[in-house]
Image (cartoon, rainbow, N blue to C red):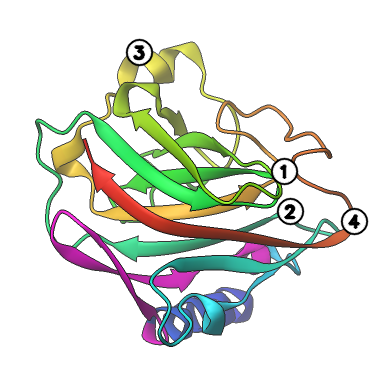
């Protein structure tokens, strides 16, 4: 019980210290808080204070991954305006460090955890090191349902459908698991204790 209270307190503190960014989606500002593997006893850490630097026009998702007892870091933002049912995907402009990140969508009600009733929807976001800017369109029908990072079973793929109008949370993650549940190779993830950095300069619905 004490552990659960500590985890709840930490999550509440992270949400209360959420950072507003210049990025918007469907006309509403994106305001991010961190959600790292500390909720499961891990030691990875997102630099929440650096999510938006003063005067910058981008989102900075950075920090340190520690695979000793964990293996993921993430940031989440509520979506204040509903995603239209007619939306087909998103377009991103970003700069990375050669790692493969994930972009997440969920209903925001604890979705995607190993004991959740609803999945989070995930797609891989590959990056190239020393490239000034990349651009990628991800169709919503390419997102995969995920529970706790594992790959989806066939019955889950058949049972769940990505419905944009039900989505009210957006996230970015670096994880030892790809969106299909397979291991993120060390060449595109890392090993041991290592830093990461992803800058997103634009995100829009398509």
Residue 116: x percent and y percent? 42, 45
Q: In the drawing, what numbered circle is on residue 176?
A: 1
- Residues tagged 2 and 1 counted as in contact (Cβ below 8 A): yes
Left-right relation of 21 to 61 = left
Residue 87: x percent and y percent? 16, 33
Tell me the residue at 35%/45% (across/down). Answer: 105
Q: CA distance from mark 2 to mark 3?
A: 29 Å
Query: What residue would you read off at disc 2?
Result: 71
The image shows residue 9, relative to residue 169, as above or below, that is below
Label 2 vs 3, first from the N-terminus = 2
Look at the image and give the residue range highlighted in magenta.
16-39
Residue 182: x percent and y percent? 68, 27
Q: Is residue 20 magenta?
A: yes
Residue 140: x percent and y percent? 31, 28
Tell me the residue at 33%/40% (across/down). Answer: 91
Residue 40 falls in which quadrant of the image? bottom right
Query: What residue would you read off at disc 3?
Result: 158
Q: CA distance from mark 3 to mark 1?
A: 25 Å
Label 2 vs 4, first from the N-terminus = 2
Between 109 and 29, the residue placed more toward the observer is 29
Element carrying mark 2: loop
Of labels 3 and 4, the one closer to you: 4
Element carrying mark 3: helix
Query: What residue would you read off at disc 4?
Result: 192
Label 3 vs 4, first from the N-terminus = 3
Label 2 vs 1, first from the N-terminus = 2
Dot 4, crowdedness within 10 Å: few (<14), some or many (≥20)? few
The image shows residue 82, relative to residue 119, as above or below, that is below
Residue 178 falls in which quadrant of the image? top right
């Amino acid at each position: 019980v004490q552990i659960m209270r500590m985890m709840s307190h930490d999550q509440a503190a992270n949400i209360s210290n959420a950072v507003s960014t210049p990025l918007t989606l469907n006309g509403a500002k994106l305001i991010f808080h961190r959600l790292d593997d500390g909720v499961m006893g891990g030691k990875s850490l997102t630099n929440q204070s650096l999510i938006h630097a003063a005067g910058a026009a981008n989102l900075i998702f950075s920090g340190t991954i520690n695979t000793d007892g964990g293996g993921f870091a993430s940031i989440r933002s509520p979506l204040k305006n509903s995603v239209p049912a007619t939306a087909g995907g998103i377009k991103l402009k970003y700069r990375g460090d050669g790692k493969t990140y994930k972009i997440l969508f969920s209903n925001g009600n604890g979705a995607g955890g190993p004991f959740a009733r609803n999945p989070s929807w995930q797609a891989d976001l590959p990056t190239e090191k020393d490239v000034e800017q990349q651009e990628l369109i991800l169709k919503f029908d390419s997102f995969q349902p995920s529970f706790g990072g594992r790959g989806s079973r066939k019955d889950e793929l058949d049972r769940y459908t990505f419905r944009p109008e039900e989505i009210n949370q957006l996230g970015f993650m670096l994880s030892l698991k790809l969106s299909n549940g397979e291991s993120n190779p060390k060449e595109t993830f890392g090993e041991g204790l290592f830093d990461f950095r992803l800058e997103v300069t634009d995100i829009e619905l398509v």
